[in-house]
Amino acid sequence: MTWEERLAQEGYVIRERFATRQPPQPLRPKDAEAAETMPEGTLLSEVRALAKRYSWEFYHTFDSRRSEYGWPDCALCDGTTLLLYELKTNTGKLTMEQQRWLSLLEHCGTIEAGIWRPRDLPQIEQRLRKGR
């Protein structure tokens, strides 16, 4: 097996003698009903995949039970913009602490903060694509 074949097998794309790994493709709900019932963990996977596709650094605290209450689920940065978003199911409710943090962050002026839900996936992708 040649090195080009080996890299291709591992998910790399060779262009002009440079090898780059293809970012993971986001999972897409097969229909609107699937998006309506999408759990928060799946939404997290979707947002993570979109962040990688559009070259954003992505951070999510694995286990926040020992952290301060209310801090947003994920942070994304492209080098010029910082996004802090709480992920919720389509029917999920914010806690008082989450409301407080998001309100404070939204008024900072240099940070974009808010809530993302499964039904927002097209807007999430559009937002992350713009940041490139």
Image: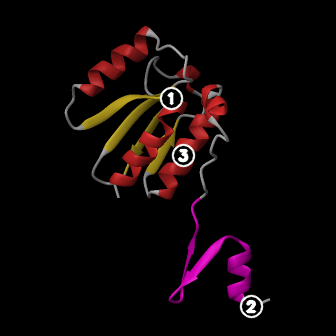
Mark nearest the camera among 1 and 3 is 1
Q: Is residue 110 left or right of residue 50?
A: left
Q: Which residue is mark 3?
A: 48
Q: Secondary structure at mark 3?
A: helix
For mark 1, what is the residue? 117
- Residue 13 included in the magenta stretch of the image: yes
Looking at the image, is mark 2 or mark 1 nearer the viewer?
1
Residue 30: tell me if it is visible.
yes
In x, y percent, where is residue 72?
44, 27
Looking at the rendered structure, the kind of residue marked 3 is Arg
Name the one closer to the observer, 69 or 53: 53
The answer to whether marks 2 and 1 mark residues whose Cβ atoms lie closer than 8 Å is no
Up the image or down, 47 lies above or below 7; here it is above
Give the camera-side residue of 66 and 59.
59
The local crowd at label 1, few if under 14, some if 14 to 19, many if 20 or more residues have their Cα within 10 Å, is: many
Residue 38, given in percent of the width and then of the height, sits at: 64, 30
Q: Nearer the viewer, residue 99 or 62?
A: 99
Mark 1 is on which residue type? Answer: Arg
The residue tagged 2 is: 2
Query: Residue at coordinates 50% horizontally, 23% vertically from top-left?
Result: 67
Q: Sequence-wise, which precedes: disc 1 or disc 3?
A: 3
The magenta stretch is: 3-23
Residue 54 location, x and y as percent? 45, 57
Which residue: 45% across, 47% down?
125
Q: Measuring 27% from the left and 21% from the top, which residue is drawn there? A: 104
